[in-house]
């Protein structure tokens, strides 16, 4: 998983170029579309149908990187992700006691 984040980290300039070219509002709308496509792909997988989950996940990773650029909130998102992961691990550990 770290490889994906490292790839996006190394593509900061490409992410900025995309946002600057298309604009923040259109990329926010594109994010909604890509997330919707991921929901549909996961739904197909859950129902045992052919799907393109990997492709849609990749699209969403790219769009999330753009959203972080647009909202300039990398530190806040990182903090919240760490909080949520820690909380979930604590819940799991409490169940195992």
Image: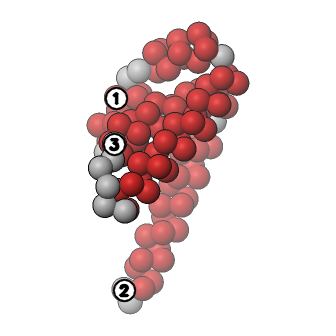
Outermost right residue: 25
Q: Quadrant of the N terminus?
A: top left
What is the secondary structure assignment of the residue under circle 3?
loop
What is the secondary structure assignment of the residue under circle 2?
loop
Can you say whether 68 is above or below 49 in the image? above
Outermost bottom residue: 97
In this figure, which colouring scheme has been used for the structure?
secondary structure
Residue found 45% across the figure and 83% down from its top: 94
Q: Earlier in the sequence, mark 2 or mark 1?
A: 1
Task: Single out the mark in the foreground, 2 or 3.
Answer: 3
Residue found 34% across the figure and 29% down from its top: 7
Read off the residue under disc 2. 96
Read off the residue under disc 1. 7
Q: Residues within 10 Å of mark 2 (few under 14, many from 20)?
A: few
Nearest to the observer: residue 86 or residue 66: 66
Nearest to the observer: residue 19 or residue 40: 40
Residue 96 at x, y percent in the picture = 36, 86
- Image quarter of residue 5: top left
Circle on res. 52? 3
Circle on res. 18? none
What is the secondary structure assignment of the residue under circle 1?
helix
Residue 92 visible? The answer is: yes
- Image quarter of residue 44: bottom left
């Amino acid at each position: 998983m770290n490889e994906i984040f490292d790839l996006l980290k190394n593509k900061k300039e490409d992410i900025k170029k995309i946002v600057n070219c298309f604009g923040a509002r259109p990329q926010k709308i594109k994010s909604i579309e890509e997330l919707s496509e991921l929901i549909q792909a996961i739904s197909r997988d859950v129902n045992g149908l052919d799907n393109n989950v990997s492709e849609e996940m990749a699209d969403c990773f790219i769009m999330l990187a753009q959203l972080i650029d647009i909202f300039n909130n990398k530190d806040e998102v990182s903090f919240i992700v760490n909080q949520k992961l820690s909380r979930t691990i604590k819940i799991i550990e409490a169940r195992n006691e």
